[in-house]
Image (spheres, rainbow, N blue to C red):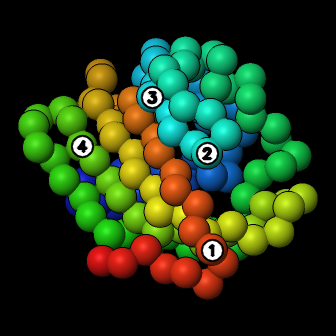
């Protein structure tokens, strides 16, 4: 499995998994950047924000780049199109960064820039 495939597998879980998935795959602290919030948050605080009833479906991730600038550190960027179970469609440009701890990739940064529906992130 390539690094990109491995990170993509973990990343998909954040869109579709519940709070326990976040507890298992986030680093102890994670920088998050959304239009409604930004900052450094503890893993448990992020996990408590996850509502299992409002997860995503019809997920389409279009990879724009994957880079491992140093051993044990990797960045994945992509465009996402998805439908929230209770809110309609969503399109965004997304970047996540990971560190490898004890053989597993843990998210340390996640940023989303919402795009107008139908707008695509350029390559």
Kindly indicate the quadrant of the structure image that contains residue 8.
bottom left
Left or right? Give the position of 3 relative to 41.
Answer: left
Q: Which label is found at residue 116?
A: 1
| Mark 3 residue crowding within 10 angstroms, few (<14) / some (14–19) / many (20+) | some
The CA distance from mark 3 to mark 2 is 13 Å
Quadrant occupied by the C terminus? bottom left
The CA distance from mark 1 to mark 3 is 24 Å
Compare marks 1 and 3 and give the one earlier in the sequence.
Answer: 3
- Foreground pick, 69 / 123: 123
The CA distance from mark 1 to mark 2 is 14 Å
- Foreground pick, 89 / 4: 89
Compare marks 1 and 4 and give the one earlier in the sequence.
Answer: 4
Q: Position of residue 106 (x, y in %)?
A: 39, 31
The CA distance from mark 4 to mark 2 is 24 Å
Kindly indicate the quadrant of the structure image that contains residue 105.
top left
Q: Which label is found at residue 31?
A: 3
Q: Position of residue 71 (x, y in %)?
A: 11, 35
Q: Secondary structure at mark 2?
A: loop
Q: Which residue is mark 4?
A: 74
Q: Are marks 3 and 2 in contact (CB under 8 Å)?
A: no
Residue 20 visible at all:
no
Q: Which label is found at residue 105?
A: none
Compare marks 4 and 2 and give the one earlier in the sequence.
Answer: 2
Left or right? Give the position of 32 relative to 103.
Answer: right
What residue sits 43% from the left and 74% below the top?
A: 121
């Amino acid at each position: 499995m390539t690094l990109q495939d491995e990170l993509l597998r973990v990343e998909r879980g954040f869109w579709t998994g519940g709070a326990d998935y976040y507890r298992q795959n986030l680093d102890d602290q994670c920088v998050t950047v959304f239009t409604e919030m930004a900052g450094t948050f503890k893993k448990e605080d992020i996990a408590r924000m996850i509502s299992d009833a409002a997860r995503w479906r019809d997920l389409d991730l279009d990879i724009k780049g994957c880079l491992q600038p140093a051993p044990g550190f990797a960045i994945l960027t992509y465009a996402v199109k998805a439908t929230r179970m209770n809110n309609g469609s969503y399109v965004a440009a997304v970047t996540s960064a990971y560190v490898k701890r004890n053989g597993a990739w843990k998210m340390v940064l996640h940023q989303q820039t919402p795009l107008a529906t139908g707008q695509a992130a350029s390559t």
